[in-house]
């Protein structure tokens, strides 16, 4: 079990990290991340997560104000 999974505590994650994990789950990548870490993702997968994070943050800002 990777060290990152052993120390995973949802309540201690920053809002950005929570969003990153949520998106990884939506894309079906969460198990891979838990088992092998973020470095196991391809550039395409990482870019997709980053793009969706940006989109969701933008949508939240528009709703707030």
Image (tube, helix red, strand yellow):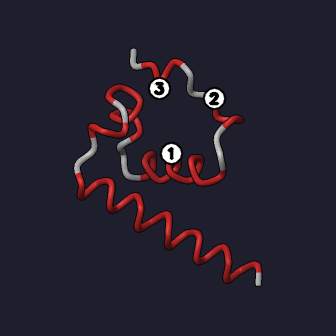
Q: Which residue is mark 2?
A: 9
| Distance between the alpha carbons at the discs numbered 3 and 1 | 13 Å
Q: Nearer the viewer, residue 30 or 3?
A: 3
The answer to which of marks 2 and 3 sits earlier in the sequence is 3
Which structural element holds mark 3? helix
Query: How far across and down, in percent of the image, does residue 37 sit?
Result: 36, 32
Q: In front here: 7 or 63?
A: 7
Note whether 8 is above or below 48 in the view shown: above
3D distance between C-alphas at marks 2 and 1: 12 Å
Q: Which mark is residue 61?
A: none
The residue at which mark 3 appears reads as 4
Considering every residue shown, the one lying at the far right of the view is 65
Instruction: Locate residue 35 relative to residue 52 in the image: left or right.
Output: left
Q: Going 41% across and 30% down the picture, which residue do you hit? A: 34
User: Which quarter of the rendered picture does the C terminus lie within?
Assistant: bottom right
Tell me, for residue 21, which label it has, or none: 1
Residue 1, how many percent across, how many down? 39, 14
Q: Is residue 30 left or right of residue 17?
A: left
Q: Earlier in the sequence, mark 2 or mark 1?
A: 2
């Amino acid at each position: 079990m990777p060290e990152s999974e052993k120390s995973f505590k949802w309540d201690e994650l920053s809002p950005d990290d929570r969003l990153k994990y949520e998106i990884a789950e939506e894309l079906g990548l969460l198990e891979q991340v838990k088992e092998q870490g973020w470095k196991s993702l391809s550039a395409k997968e990482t870019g997709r997560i980053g793009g969706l994070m940006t989109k969701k943050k933008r949508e939240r800002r528009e709703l707030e104000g």
